[in-house]
Amino acid sequence: MRWARAAGRGLLAAAVLVAGYMGPGTPQGVADSTGRGPMTLVTAGDLTHYLGPLLDDWNRDHAGEKVTLVELPDSADETRAQMISELRSGSDRFDVLNIDVAWVPEFAAAGWISPLRRDRFPLDTFLAPVVDTATFDGRLYAVPYVTNAGLLYYRKDILDRAGEQPPRTWAELSRQARTLAPEYGMGGYAGQFLPYEGLTVNATEAVLSAGGSILRDDGARVSVDSAAARAGLEFLAGGVRDGWIAPEARGYKEEESRQAFQDGRLLFLRNWPYMYAGANEPGSKVAGAFGTVPLPGPSGPGTSVLGGSDLAVSSHSRHPESAADLIAYLTSERVQRQVLTEGSLPPVRAALYEDPALIRAYPYLPTLRQSLLAAEPRAKSPRYDQVTLAVQAVVQDVMALRQSPEQAVARLSRELGSIAHRG
């Protein structure tokens, strides 16, 4: 999952599913009339091993609704494929699905997850933008569990030496990347530009930062053919053409880009918050020598894409009441604090971003909060898997300088229009 792949070293790669299994005397496929019973929590790989203790706490207090942890493959594509295979079959194996925020419209439109009552969850205590990731067609289909936003990592020591402030605009970023980086034998700027979901995220952030969009109205309207979208793609194409985007960055995912920055090979990097701790560890060539700011935009701070995962209840769940209670537990303030401190994941509870003790331990929290409050979801579509592949193919051609931004947005508009009208 997208938020999971942002985890590289130590971020939870989990698409968490809570799957029900038969209790004593409960025949296969027959729901408990109370909607309560034991569950199985299935994850795509809990790399930080923080979920076990959280579930132990739940199990001590819920003898009849115990949760067993089962892990799916670490690959987001494999996890999604296994989830969809079960859901399409009508299986009641899954109770709660922790799905990538980009998958909510697809799962909701397919009828695989059930609408949730807003009054059952304290959504007003969450960061406002993250709640939008859990909705489709005006209804709440999930509850935010983990969030994420891109940050600009920069070499503070080098900018200080040059008497420069970290960039707030694309012009400042490109000038510093073009002029300062060569003096130190390093690349200017990188993101995640390999053709995979990371490229969709980086390209979407450029389009959003310029004031554009890719899809509107939950995927019903294609909006990418605009001057703003062309400006966003030109930002990326211009970086390649003018040399301030490191050539090797076109082969980077999260971990490759993290390693390049941590090895001192980049002046600027767009990445997720997970890499902050590792870049400050002993042995890192940039420990104590870097900072973070919101992503730049054309005339000021730009717009990040919201990452993360949301918890949803399977429409075939035999234990929907237990499932909803588990979601409430996993999104409670106490557990969300542990999501940050034990799982190294950005929580969805707003108050945690203003907690002085947490800010001392995680100095990037104020910057991350600023980025999250200005962030927007990726394009919503019931056929998001097709949308992202189209975006990746077009942006890859733009960054290979095989197609101009003008040609690219026209082509993408046609392809997305075909996807939107596909049955």
Image (cartoon, grey):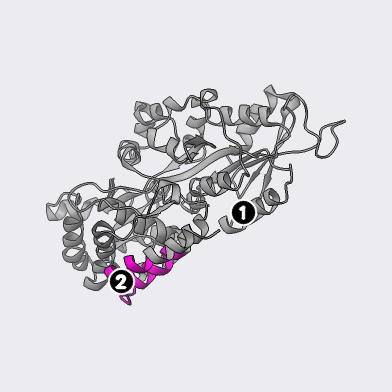
Q: Residue furthest right?
A: 25
Q: Quadrant of residue 38?
A: top right
| Magenta stretch, residue numbers | 390-412
Residue 59 image position (x, y, % from top left): 69, 28
Quickly name the residue at label 1.
Answer: 79
- In the displayed structure image, the side of residue 363 where residue 336 appears, left or right: right
Which of disc 1 and disc 2 is earlier in sequence? 1
Residue 316 image position (x, y, % from top left): 70, 40
Mark 1: amino acid: Thr
Locate the C terminus by quadrant: bottom right
- 161 or 422: which is nearer to us? 422
Q: Which residue lies at the image location 80% right of the left edge and 39% below the top edge?
A: 29
Disc 2 packing (10 Å; few <14; some 14–19; many ≥20): some
Quickly name the residue at label 2.
Answer: 407
Mark 2: amino acid: Gln
Q: Secondary structure at mark 2?
A: helix
In this rendering, the answer to whether 351 lies above or below 252 is above
Q: Which residue lies at the image location 63% right of the left edge and 44% below the top edge?
A: 112
Residue 93 image position (x, y, % from top left): 73, 43
Q: CA distance from mark 2 to mark 1?
A: 35 Å
Q: Residue furthest left?
A: 163
In this rendering, the answer to whether 255 lies above or below 376 is below
- 153 or 130: which is nearer to us? 130
Which label was assigned to residue 231? Answer: none
Question: Is 406 one of the magenta-colored residues?
Answer: yes
Q: Which residue lies at the image location 52% right of the left edge and 30% below the top edge?
A: 331
Q: Nearer the viewer, mark 2 or mark 1?
A: 2
